Amino acid sequence: MNLEAFILGTGGMMPLPNRFLTSVLLRREGELFLFDGGEGTQVSLRKLNLRWKKISAIFISHTHADHVTGLPGILMLSSQVDRDDPLTIIGPPKIAEYIESSRRVLDMYINYEIVVKEITEPGIVYEGEGFHIRAFPLRHTKPCVGYVFEEDERPGAFHPEKAEALKVPRGPLWSKLQSGEPVLNSDGIMVYPEQVLGEKRKGRKFSYVTDTLAFPEIAQEVANSDLFVCEGMFERDLLESAKEKKHMTAEQAAQIAAHAGGIKKLALIHYSPRYTEHNLKQLLKEAQAIFPETVLSRDRALFPIEYED
């Protein structure tokens, strides 16, 4: 089952000609999840030829303009593409008011169900088959949350030689054992999955954090992420400015990744418009000095998220 993260926009504060505002799309097979929807989100979706009308849920970190200005267009256009399924929008307080006021002021024609859920406490905010998405509080100038997508553990590797030794005939019974069901062998004796399977295997994990001061609890939330997308808005020399505005430096993002443990890749995002494409190399350099597995997100970049085994 494929799991991929598409970076739709990487900018903070204002869009630039080649840098739209922060937005990330996560695709798990045919199911799509959008994290934030800054200005330019629709353009990147179109350029990547993604079937964005299949978006199941949108997760908003907070209601500052550079994270939600792309939403009204998405909501209106969804009425033109024969959408049948409800669209769930999840975010901190004020997201319901923003959606409702946008619909009213713009006189939106909406012919599908929109379900808005406001986050009032940390925890699981969305569940699907074999995975869940949870939210945790960040520290910004207004209520803001980070998100973690995490798959359930998978069954351990199947050992056919053990099944054969236990007289389980090859075929459908093997499939049942692999899916966790006990079966009767050719002698009528019950064989249990744990007799033929190895240890359970970790599912994949994706974490999304932007617009926050750095603080230790973030590391606990994002530990063991296969892909950690995190704001790296400023370079080290602007640390005081970052603190004042309640943002992070690229170096601080790398410190979180290093302290968390088990993170395979850190992808920086939400760059200040002060940085040209050339200047972004300084952010990368500072982060890689602490966490070598750091990369710069780019608009419309693709990050496949693979199983460990």
Image (cartoon, rainbow, N blue to C red):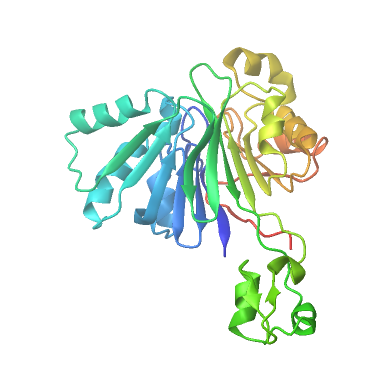
Residue at x 45%, y 62% (from the top left corner): 30
Q: Is residue 10 visible?
A: no
Occupied quadrant, residue 46 = bottom left
The answer to whether 128 is drawn above or below residue 9 in the figure is below
Residue at image coords 28%, 50%: 78
Location of the N terminus by quadrant is bottom right
> Could you say where residue 269 lies in the image, as x and y percent from the top left?
60, 37
Quadrant, the C terminus = bottom right
Closer to us: 32 or 161: 161
The residue at 59%/18% (across/down) is 246
Q: Is residue 157 above or below residue 222?
A: below
Q: Nearer the viewer, residue 204 or 21?
A: 204
Q: Is residue 220 visible?
A: yes
Q: Position of residue 29 (x, y in %)?
A: 50, 62
Q: Residue furthest right?
A: 289
Q: How many marks?
A: 0
Residue 158, image x and y in percent? 72, 72
90 and 66: which is toward the camera: 90
Residue at image coords 47%, 43%: 126
Query: Could you tell whether 181 is left or right of 9 in the image?
Result: right
